[in-house]
């Protein structure tokens, strides 16, 4: 007891805490080298962030902007598109519902992209004939649209068709991903089923972990909290990997830039197992 007081007094004379060891202690002082590293590291990421902003702006202005001017008729057509919620059935540049065909290239499919008058006449005739009543075909309702609005809608679809979408959609009428043309894409179905099972395990593990955390005496001997937490975390990691692997498997064979349009079945199959 006397030796402890002597050591404690000696430690206090040096300005040290007798309860902490003097060796291996981590300094909490922000030194000049640490401040310099923080400054240059932050400056580096600021430069990267500004570079990404400049590149995004350049890409939007020079590449992804429509080649057709934004006229009042185009703006009117966009308002008609939004007022009648066309996006609830159609897609435009991949955004919307997949009940009806993609419309960002409809004027190219009809062969009237560079003829505004023919574009208006074809679209007006098509809209007037709806619903067509054709058996086994999805029907489009009839919309009461004025001639001015119809011309604006035609110009809006022409404007959307003049945008460089870099090969989108992968098929003429859109609806990408609804069919599986290649054998390698069928592997993505197995990825999806396993990913859904893993998601269910995550939800169940999260509920059990929360229950055990709130009521420690519940199932604590059978399923300890640390075991449930480990299973929940590892399952989430594998679930994310499943999604990252399945995405390129189903998309790559349909990439418009692909030359062959096919991918090897064993190469796509072995990562799953």
Image: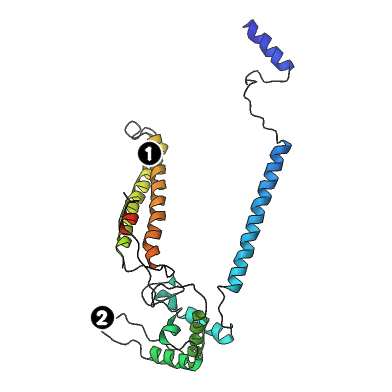
Q: Is residue 237 visible?
A: yes
Identify the element where label 2 is drawn.
Answer: loop
**What residue sits right under mark 1 in the picture?**
228
Q: Quadrant of residue 145?
A: bottom left
**What residue sits right under mark 2 in the picture?**
136
Q: Quadrant of the N terminus?
A: top right
Nearest the eye: 196 or 204: 196
Residue 44, x across and y down, in percent:
66, 51
How far separated are the C-alphas under marks 2 and 1? 51 Å
Q: Report whether 43 appears left or right of 194.
A: right
Q: Quadrant of residue 228?
A: top left
Nearest the eye: 157 or 164: 164
Residue 195, x across and y down, in percent:
35, 53
- Alpha-carbon neighbours of circle 1 within 10 Å: few (<14), some, or many (≥20)? some
Identify the element where label 1 is drawn.
Answer: helix
Residue ID at (42%, 46%):
237
In front: label 2 or label 1: 2
Q: Is residue 215 visible?
A: no
């Amino acid at each position: 007891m006397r030796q402890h007081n002597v050591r404690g007094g000696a430690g206090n004379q040096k300005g040290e805490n007798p309860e902490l060891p003097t060796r291996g202690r981590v300094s909490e002082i922000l030194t000049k080298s640490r401040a310099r590293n923080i400054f240059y590291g932050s400056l580096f990421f600021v430069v990267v962030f500004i570079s990404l902003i400049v590149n995004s702006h350049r890409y939007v202005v020079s590449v992804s902007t429509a080649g057709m001017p934004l006229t009042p008729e185009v703006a009117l057509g966009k308002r008609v598109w939004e007022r009648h919620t066309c996006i609830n059935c159609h897609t435009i540049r991949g955004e919307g519902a997949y009940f009806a065909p993609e419309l960002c290239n409809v004027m190219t499919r009809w062969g009237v992209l560079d003829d505004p008058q023919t574009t208006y006449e074809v679209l007006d005739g098509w809209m007037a004939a709806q619903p067509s009543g054709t058996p086994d075909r999805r029907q489009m309702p009839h919309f009461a649209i004025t001639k001015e609005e119809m011309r604006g809608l035609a110009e809006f679809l022409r404007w959307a068709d003049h945008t460089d979408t870099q090969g989108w959609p992968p098929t003429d009428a859109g609806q990408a991903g609804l069919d599986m043309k290649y054998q390698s894409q069928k592997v993505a179905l197995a990825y999806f089923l396993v990913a859904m099972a893993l998601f269910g395990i995550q939800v169940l593990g999260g509920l059990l972990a929360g229950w055990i955390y709130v009521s420690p005496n519940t199932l604590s001997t059978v399923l300890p909290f640390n075991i449930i937490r480990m299973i929940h975390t590892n399952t989430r990691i594998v679930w994310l990997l499943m999604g990252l692997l399945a995405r390129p498997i189903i998309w790559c064979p349909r990439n418009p830039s692909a030359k062959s349009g096919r991918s090897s079945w064993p190469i796509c199959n072995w990562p799953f197992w």
